[in-house]
Amino acid sequence: MYDVIVVGAGYAGAVSARQLADKGKKVLILEKRNHIGGNAFDEPDEHEILIHTYGPHIFHTSSKEVYDFLGKFTEWRLYHHKVVGNVYGKFIPIPFNINSIRLVYNEYKANNLIEKLINEYGRETAIPILQLRANKDEDIRELAEYVYENIFVKYTGKQWGVAPEEIDEAVTARVPVILTEQDGYFTDDYQAMPRDGYTRLFERMLSHPNIEVRLNIDAKDCIKLEGGQIFFECIEFDGDVIYTGMIDELFERCFGALPYRSLRFEFEHYHKESYQPEAVVNYTVDEDFTRITEFKKMTGQQAAGTTIVKEYSLNFEPDTELIPYYAILNDENKALYEKYFNLASRYKNLYLLGRLAEYKYYNMDAITKKALELCERMV
Ligand code: FAD
Ligand code: UDP
């Protein structure tokens, strides 16, 4: 009856389902939550403020293909996302940039630092903090030390439970020091929010005669893998299966559990127009939470009150209510992932896709691109 079964209705699952449905395939999506959209899901809270239930999601990409593909299901509201760090009560632009340097140092010292940095790296260059710390110049190293101590060490400790040099260097390199006077968290060509929210985007994407979505169904309960054959509801399934859940769970954690970080969100509503200076404030030196997001400032919603969310990071524990949000990328975990990947390769009609199935740190645009590429290969 179905050509393809897709496990998960987040970006990975929904984009592939739509792409395959457009090419004439009959697709069944199994989603264990009671809604589509995965972690990008949004909904109005009890005060009618549109919130992101699983943390702030800002769309940004340099891929026109991805922007145009998703643009078939939403109109965009252009939005240039800015983040500031709360450093002992002072708001400093993050990524740390030329404006941040001027806020931290007196004019003479700031000018000297900026000149040295531009001479060495060039204007508009992005330098990962771990690389900047290795600079030979004493002044530059002093700046790097300031940024490391006041922006990275404590935030990374809260988010990952370890020091910046103990996680994959690509993680802190997501937020490099940038030699620009333009504040902004991202440098991509396209930066926007779906005008009617992410959930609406997903509803439109999945509204297709060839797509059936079943919510509140855990694939664990109806898909079994045995000896190279996939069974769906106890019957051999010879169509394709795109799996976007946790890979270790798919194989009953036979090699041990893959570690993930989870999050706890605390939402608060205030009867005032504005709560904080920017949509996101990172707490880089104090507090137990990592950041506060004020949704209205991201979505552009007009309302008298405002809702914020505080994010606390914690270790993921399998078989609890916790959600695995982030793969913890290091050599040991990547090696464990490989074992599961090799096991999965024995199933010719099984495709692993997404943050959880591939154990990767994908942004929304990157996973959309990956899903489009996979479907291209599959048909
Ligand atoms: P998911 O969204 O996790 O979707 C997987 C789906 O599979 C889920 O709905 C899950 O319930 C379902 N599932 C899992 N196992 C099963 C099972 N056994 N049976 C049935 N269903 C199952 N990206 C950006 O580009 N910009 C941002 O600003 C941004 N902010 C983020 C903030 C936070 C706090 C987090 C955690 C992520 C953020 N991301 C952001 C990344 C973005 O969330 C991911 O790129 C995207 O969600 C990946 O999609 P996915 O389909 O791989 O995973
Ligand atoms: N980071 C930090 N301080 C900041 C912002 C980021 O230490 O103010 C580090 C931290 O380790 C974080 C990583 O850079 O996990 C990537 O940050 P990003 O904002 O991309 O994380 P995400 O939004 O995906 O949680």
Image (cartoon, rainbow, N blue to C red):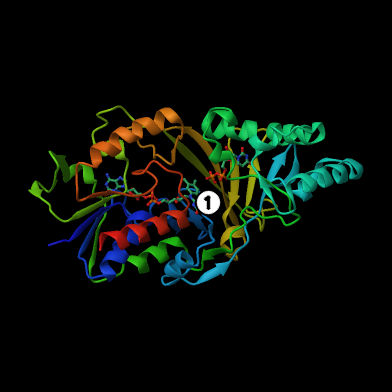
Horizontal relation, residue 56 to residue 233: left or right: right
- Can residue 10 be seen at all in this image of the molecule? no
- Can residue 234 be seen at all in this image of the molecule? yes
Horizontal relation, residue 182 to residue 57: left or right: right
Q: Which residue appears at 36% of the width and 59% of the height? A: 373
Q: Position of residue 105 (x, y in %)?
A: 85, 40
In this orientation, which residue lies closer to the viewer: 281 or 174? Answer: 174
In this orientation, which residue lies closer to the viewer: 288 or 63? Answer: 63
Task: Report the residue marked by disc 1.
Answer: 56
Is disc 1's CB within 8 Å of ligand 1? yes
Q: Quadrant of the C terminus?
A: bottom left
Horizontal relation, residue 211 to residue 262: left or right: left
Q: Position of residue 46 (x, y in %)?
A: 48, 56
Residue 249 versus residue 53 in the image, above or below? above
Residue 364 versus residue 266 in the image, above or below? below
Could you classify mark 1 by the number of other residues whose Cα lies within 10 Å: few (under 14), some (14-19), or many (20 or more)?
many
Q: Position of residue 320 (x, y in %)?
A: 34, 33
SS at mark 1 in the image: loop
Q: In which quadrant of the rendered view does residue 206 lie?
A: bottom left
Q: Quadrant of ligand 2?
A: top right
Seen from this angle, which residue lies furthest right?
A: 108
Name which residue type carries label 1.
Pro
In this orientation, which residue lies closer to the viewer: 153 or 337? Answer: 337
- Number of residue marks: 1
In this orientation, which residue lies closer to the viewer: 209 or 47? Answer: 209
Q: Quadrant of the N terminus?
A: bottom left
Q: Position of residue 42 (x, y in %)?
A: 45, 57
Q: Which residue appears at 46% of the width and 44% of the height? A: 361
Q: Which residue appears at 61% of the width and 55% of the height? A: 186
Q: Which residue appears at 75% of the width and 40% of the height? A: 89
